[in-house]
């Protein structure tokens, strides 16, 4: 079997167009504030892409860049000002932060209604209990990619590899809410293949090249690759050994062009959702 490649770039484009239509219908521009502290080059690229996507969708965006020495109290004061700013509906503080800043305190300072990353304990609690709320963009994008295959999740076995607060844990909860049977594997799982070989859906989110190989995949499975790694030759690749797994899987996301573009599209959808709720 040769897997159908799930085109994340095309699906993201459709969601970005939907976000733009939603913004136009709202009568006021949804506003996203992005804060970047320090000069991590990868973060600078991510942040620029987020702001550019906002502009293309007709959103208002605000990029605030601060040097790596910014104090925690100065950052919390900026967040408080943005919480009170009625032109801003979403606030995103790009991670990772410099070591002297406490990411938990920073995330908790964002008003829950503006937590478009879905990283706060309020948003996490809403996801855990099935209440409506803002869901983390990357796992939400993975759900949309899975839905785009047309395969119903109810009763399927999904294996998530990775247990981060930003991807693995919320991914497992979203799959559970969609009535899948969910297994979460991680660095202390003794026999990863034992689990993945039984999975109808595998989501790989560990950040390690070749974590999932063809022998570990059930024929016809849906394989979602969240990893972004750089090979020795400088090329980007995911956590999945794409060239071999595509011969076994039913559906597979490429890297680049799979999950990555969906993260930004879902950030726009979250910002629209926050603006719609604020303007109701
Ligand atoms: N750093 C890498 N991905 C993300 C993300 O989705 N949100 C934030 N705030 N920081 C990140």
Image: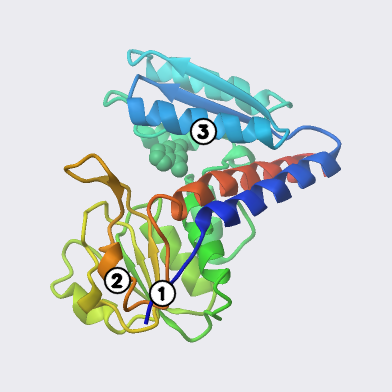
Q: Please name the residue shown 27% across and 55% down the image.
A: 206
Q: Check disc 2 and report the residue beneath it.
A: 245
Q: Secondary structure at mark 2?
A: helix
Q: Nearer the viewer, residue 7 or 273?
A: 7
**How many residues crowd around disc 3 within 10 Å: few (fewer than 14), some, or many (20 or more)?**
some
In space, the residues marked 3 and 2 are separated at their CA atoms by 30 Å
- Dividing the picture into quadrants, the one containing residue 101 is top left
Residue visible at 31% across and 83% down in the picture:
218
Residue 147 coordinates in the image, percent (x, y): 57, 70
The image shows residue 209, relative to residue 93, as above or below, that is below
Q: Nearer the viewer, residue 119 or 238?
A: 238
Whether disc 3's CB lies below 8 Å from ligand 1 is answered no
Mark 1 or 3, nearer chain start: 1
Q: Is mark 1 within 8 Å of ligand 1?
A: no
Circle 1/circle 2 CB separation < 8 Å: yes
**Marker disc for residue 148:** none
Q: How many marks?
A: 3
Q: Quadrant of ligand 1?
A: top left
192 on left or right of 172: left
Mark 2, ligand 1, within 8 Å: the answer is no
Q: Which residue is mark 3?
A: 49
The residue located at (86%, 36%) in the rendering is 27
**Image vertical order of residue 73 relative to residue 268, above or below:** above
Earlier in the chain: of badge 3 and badge 2, it is: 3
Q: Which residue is mark 1?
A: 3
- Judged by depth in the image, the label closer to the viewer, 3 or 2, is 2
Mark 1 secondary-structure assignment: loop
Q: Quadrant of residue 208?
A: bottom left
């Amino acid at each position: 079997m040769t897997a159908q490649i799930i085109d994340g770039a095309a699906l993201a484009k459709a969601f970005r167009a939907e976000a733009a239509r939603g913004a136009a219908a709202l009568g006021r521009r949804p506003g996203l504030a992005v804060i970047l502290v320090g000069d991590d080059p990868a973060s600078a690229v991510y942040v620029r892409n987020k702001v550019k996507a906002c502009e293309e969708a007709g959103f208002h965006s605000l990029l605030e860049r601060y040097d790596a020495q910014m104090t925690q109290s100065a950052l919390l004061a900026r967040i408080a000002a943005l919480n009170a700013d009625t032109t801003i509906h979403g606030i995103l503080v790009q991670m990772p932060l410099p070591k002297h800043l406490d990411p938990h305190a920073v995330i908790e300072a964002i008003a829950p209604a503006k937590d478009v990353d879905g990283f706060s304990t309020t948003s996490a609690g809403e996801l855990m209990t099935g209440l409506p709320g803002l869901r983390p963009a990357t796992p939400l994008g993975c759900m949309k990619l899975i839905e785009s295959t047309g395969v119903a999740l109810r009763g399927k076995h999904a294996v998530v590899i990775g247990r981060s607060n930003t991807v693995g844990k919320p991914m497992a909860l979203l799959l559970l809410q969609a009535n899948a049977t969910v297994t979460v594997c991680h660095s202390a799982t003794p026999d990863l293949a034992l689990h993945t070989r039984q999975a109808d859906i595998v989501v790989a989110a560990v950040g390690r090249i070749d974590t999932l190989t063809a022998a570990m995949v059930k024929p016809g499975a849906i394989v979602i690759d969240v990893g972004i790694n750089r090979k020795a030759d400088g090329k980007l690749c995911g956590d999945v050994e794409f060239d071999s797994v595509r011969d076994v899987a039913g559906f597979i996301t490429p890297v680049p062009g799979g999950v990555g573009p969906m993260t930004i599209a879902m950030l726009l959808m979250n910002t629209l959702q926050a603006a719609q709720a604020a303007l109701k």
